[in-house]
Image (spheres, rainbow, N blue to C red):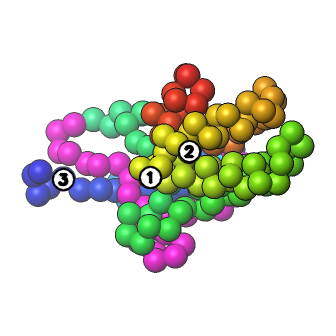
Amino acid sequence: MPSDCWYDTAQICLNGHLINKTFVSFPQKNQNFCQDCGTQTITNCQCCQTSIKGYYHIPGTFLFKNEFQIPKFCQNCGMPYPWTESALKAAQDFADELENLTPEEREVLKQSINDLVTNTPNVEAAGWRFKNLVAKSGVFAADTFHKILVNIISETVKRSIWHS
């Protein structure tokens, strides 16, 4: 890795919309609030204040629009970013509303959601449990979970659950 390569800082709104993956090098793109949802934007982890990793600059290369993924967790302290926390909370709150599941099944579903997001070795079993419990709740539940979780779970997990 050449020594003149470096990570820029990313600016992301509290709901997880990317504002600027090049906060330092292209400040003209910076915004205090998100134009999609109106929430405040951040450039640092709210727990440890470490800059959110943005675009990786390699001299002589160009910026490509889709080569940046919004991180779910801080690379320094491991805490979830606000958009990860809010999506987890929304999914868990929705799980509590599912009438076709017993209280015990709802708890298993909520733990499975946590495992899907953190992508632990438990992810395969969690995906299986999640898929089976959501199937008991119907298509609307599956679609709602997909909308809530699509940005905070890995592509592999998405494919195993939704075959997309």
The residue where tag 1 is placed is: 120
Q: Quadrant of the C terminus?
A: top right
Q: Secondary structure at mark 1?
A: loop
**Residue interval drawn in magenta:** 36-61
Residue at x-position 78% and y-position 26% = 139
Residue at x-position 49% and y-position 54% = 118
In the figure, residue 134 lies in which quadrant?
Answer: top right
Residue at x-position 69% and y-position 48% = 109
Q: Amino acid at mark 3?
A: Cys
Q: Position of residue 11 (x, y in %)?
A: 50, 56
Give the mark, 3 or 2, whose residue is nearer the N terminus.
3
* Image marks 1 and 2: residues in contact by CB distance under 8 Å: yes
Query: Which one is in front in this view, the residue at disc 3 or the one at disc 2?
Result: 2
Q: CA distance from mark 1 to mark 3?
A: 30 Å
* Relative to 54, 97 lies left or right: right
Residue reaching furthest left? 2
The residue where tag 2 is placed is: 126
Q: Which mark is residue 5?
A: 3
Q: Amino acid at mark 2?
A: Ala
Give the mark, 1 or 3, whose residue is nearer the N terminus.
3
Q: CA distance from mark 3 to mark 2?
A: 38 Å
